């Protein structure tokens, strides 16, 4: 539907439901057609904007509320214009119909035709003939006779409960608005039924060009007279909303009679059964979703538990690995300390052995010195023999140290000394230097 337009003159507005600020305002539209000449020069074209400005200039001391292009071809341009009041339509038509436009750069004259906009609204003959000729309709039953109005393009915000704070339309508001024409038997707003789109496959949320959310509704009157009065009141009208601040806006709505038995008892019962099935199906889907969610939660819980177990196992393995590493380090340190201790003990043992050998060497040297001293003492004691004198004798073969004396004499104590000296060559190297010196001194003294 068309976007809501601002209304400056509300003098022709008719009350619909002043409590909700709703009024009816006559549709003041006109159709303007401008015939285009044949373009003889290639590359030249006629500007739609220039034609529109010329049309606005042709109405003296007045102006269009809206003027837009509805169709444009090579032969003509069709405009839809709207004015504030119904009384201005005739004056606008008088200024436009049969007039001509001369555009700069074009020698041909453009002819203008204007007429009042033909409203697409059903007549009494239309619904009477429809229900009379329809074979599947029983005019004795509600909904199968001309008693239901089908409304499209109603702004949601205009039919919402003021105290609710919501912008969704309300069936109570719809009843209060249209019960002015007669007692209402039933109303239906498909937009409010969450299952309706799934049942019918239609989208009941529509937007206007201004971005406002619109809805469609069905209003069923109990008596035929209520239906007639409502259709007569809505013919050639658009819906106007007047706010608390006094500003008014209006929008076009589409009004027709219901030819689909929408509010018949059979259709209502059928929708109820379908709604019940959809509710059961939705409950099954919700139950399925719940079970799937529970299964998914269980699976996630098991996965979390498995992850925790795996994490604990990894932690245990890490601790075991760390413990083994620490044990290896301790064992390595222990072996290192053991080697150090063994090396230290070996060094101490070696030093002790060296000390023992040194002490043994010292003891052996001391013993040899003592033996040498004893030997010297013994030699000296034997050397003091009474009556000892030099005798002429041959050199003693056992005294290699005693050279032969002059005229073959040697000391008289040579025999005892020589006898005391060991004759074995193996004993000679064992004599210490002091013993050897002592033996030599004795020999020289003799």
Image (cartoon, grey):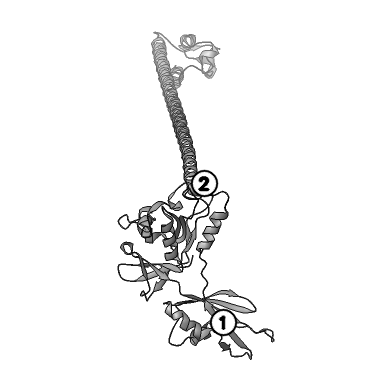
Residue 142 rendering spot, x and y as whole percentages: 46, 49
Q: Residue at x 50, y 87 (%)?
A: 58
Residue 269 in view here: yes
Graded by Cα atoms within 10 Å as few (under 14), some (14 to 19) or many (20 or more), the crowding at tag 1 reads some
Q: Is residue 419 above or below residue 93?
A: above
Q: Residue at x 50, y 11 (%)?
A: 422
> Which secondary structure lies at badge 1?
strand
Which of these two is toward me, 218 or 289? Answer: 218
Which of these two is toward me, 250 or 375? Answer: 250
In the drawing, does residue 180 fall left or right of residue 283?
left
Residue 154 in view here: no
Graded by Cα atoms within 10 Å as few (under 14), some (14 to 19) or many (20 or more), the crowding at tag 2 reads few
- Select label 2 or label 1 by which is in front: 1
Residue 290 rendering spot, x and y as whole percentages: 45, 36
Which of these two is toward me, 271 or 247? Answer: 271
In the drawing, does residue 78 fall left or right of residue 383?
right
Q: Residue at x 41, y 54 (%)?
A: 223
In the rendering, which numbered label is found on residue 199? 2
Q: Which of the two labelled residues, at mark 2 and mark 1, occupies the earlier sequence position? A: 1
- The residue that disc 1 covers is 113
């Amino acid at each position: 539907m068309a976007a809501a337009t601002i209304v400056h003159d509300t003098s022709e507005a008719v009350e619909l439901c002043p409590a909700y600020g709703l009024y009816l305002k006559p549709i003041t539209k006109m159709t303007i057609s401008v015939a285009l000449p044949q373009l003889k020069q290639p590359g030249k074209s006629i500007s739609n904007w220039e034609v529109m400005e010329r049309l606005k200039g042709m109405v003296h001391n007045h102006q269009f509320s809206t003027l837009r292009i509805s169709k444009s071809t090579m032969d003509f341009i069709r405009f839809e214009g709207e004015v504030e009041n119904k009384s201005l339509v005739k004056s606008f038509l008088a200024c436009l119909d049969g007039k001509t436009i001369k555009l700069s750069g074009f020698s041909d004259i453009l002819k203008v035709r204007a007429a009042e906009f033909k409203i697409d609204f059903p007549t009494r003959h239309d619904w009477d003939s429809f229900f009379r000729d329809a074979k599947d309709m029983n005019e004795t039953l509600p909904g199968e006779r001309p008693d239901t109005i089908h409304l499209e393009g109603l702004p949601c915000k205009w039919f919402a409960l003021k105290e609710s704070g919501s912008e969704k339309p309300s069936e109570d508001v719809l009843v209060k608005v249209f019960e002015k024409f007669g007692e209402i038997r039933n109303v239906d707003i498909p937009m409010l039924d969450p299952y309706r789109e799934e049942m019918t496959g239609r989208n009941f949320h529509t937007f206007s060009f201004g971005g406002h959310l619109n809805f469609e509704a069905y209003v069923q009157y109990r008596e035929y007279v209520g239906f007639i009065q409502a259709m007569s009141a809505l013919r050639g009208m658009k819906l106007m909303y007047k706010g608390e601040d006094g500003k008014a806006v209006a929008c076009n709505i589409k009004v027709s009679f219901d030819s689909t038995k929408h509010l018949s008892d059979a259709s209502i019962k059928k929708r109820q059964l379908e709604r019940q099935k959809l509710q059961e199906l939705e409950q099954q889907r919700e139950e399925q979703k719940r079970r799937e969610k529970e299964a998914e939660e269980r699976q996630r819980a098991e996965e979390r538990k498995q992850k925790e177990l795996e994490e604990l196992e990894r932690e245990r393995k890490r601790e075991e690995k760390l413990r083994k590493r620490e044990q290896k380090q301790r064992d390595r340190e222990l072996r290192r300390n053991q080697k150090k201790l063994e090396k230290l003990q070996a060094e101490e043992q070696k030093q002790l052995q060296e000390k023992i050998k040194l002490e043994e060497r010292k003891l052996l040297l001391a013993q040899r010195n003592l033996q040498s001293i004893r030997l010297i003492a013994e030699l000296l004691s034997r050397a003091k023999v009474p009556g000892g004198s030099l005798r002429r004798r041959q050199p003693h073969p056992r005294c290699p140290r005693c050279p032969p004396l002059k005229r073959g004499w040697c000391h008289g104590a040579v025999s005892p000394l020589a006898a005391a000296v060991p004759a074995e060559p193996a004993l000679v190297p064992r004599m210490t230097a002091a013993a050897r010196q002592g033996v030599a001194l004795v020999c020289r003294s003799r």
